[in-house]
Amino acid sequence: MLHFHQSSLIDAPVAVVWEFHERPDVLTLLTPPWQPVQVLRREGGLDEGAETEFLLGWGVFSLRWLARHVECKPYELFVDRQVTGPFAKWLHWHQFEEEQGKTQLTDTIAFALPGGEAIESLAGSLVMAQLDSLFRYRHQVTKQYCERSSQAA
C-alpha cells in the first residue's frame, strides 16, 4: 500500500469548510480543468453510505469509478472507499480540525495499484505526483472559497 498526505491551514471556521464540502457541486468545483473527470452521480452528501460515481476519460478510453462513504463524523471527518475503479484499493480520509477559528484540512489516502508491488514500484511515483497536483489544486480552491465566505459573513 502507498500513502499520500496533504494538509492546509484555512483561515475559516470548521463549519464553513465542512459546509463547502457538502455543496452539491463541490466535486465539480474541486476538479482541476486538466483532469478528465466527470461526476455522473452523487447521492447522500457526506453521510455514511453516500455514493459518488465518476467517469474518468483518456481519449477514447474511459473508466467508471464508484466511491462510497464508509464513515462520517460531522465537522470532523468523512472517509470514502473505492467500490470499483482504477485502483486495487483506495481509502481516503478527509479530516477537519479547528483551532482558534482556523481549520486544518487534511487529506490522507491509502491506495494500492493493480498488479501489486512491481507496478507500484514502477508507477507509484507517477500516481503520487498526480495526487500531489490534484490535492494542491483542491486545497487552494477550498482555501480561497472558504476564506472569502468567512470574511463576507
Image (cartoon, rainbow, N blue to C red):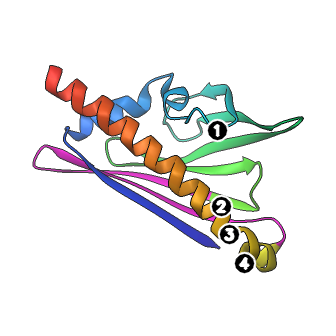
Q: What's drawn in magenta, residue-wise? A: 91-115
Q: Is residue 92 magenta?
A: yes
**Crowd class of label 3 (few under 14; some 14 to 19; many from 20; radius 10 Å):** some
For mark 2, does the 10 Å Cα neighbourhood hold few (<14), some (14 to 19), or many (20 or more) residues?
Answer: some
Residue identified by numbered label 2: 127
Q: Residue at 17%, 45% (x, y): give it.
A: 102
Q: Name the quarter where the C terminus is drawn.
A: top left
State the SS at label 4: helix
Could you tell me the amino acid type at mark 3?
Gly
* Kind of residue indicated by mark 4: Ser
Q: Of callouts 4 and 1, which one flags the residue occurring earlier in the amino acid sequence?
A: 1
Which quadrant: the N terminus? Answer: bottom right
- Separation of residues labelled 3 and 4 (CA atoms): 6 Å
Whole-Å distance between the Cαs marked 2 and 4? 11 Å
Position of residue 69 relative to residue 38, above or below, is: below
The residue where tag 1 is placed is 35
Horizontal side of 114 relative to 11 (left or right) equals: right
The one of 109 and 145 positioned closer to us in this rendering: 145
Identified by mark 1, the residue type is Gln
In terms of image quadrants, where is residue 130? bottom right
Can residue 114 be seen at all in this image of the molecule? yes
* Neighbourhood count class around disc 1 (C-alpha, 10 Å): few under 14, some 14–19, many 20 upward: few
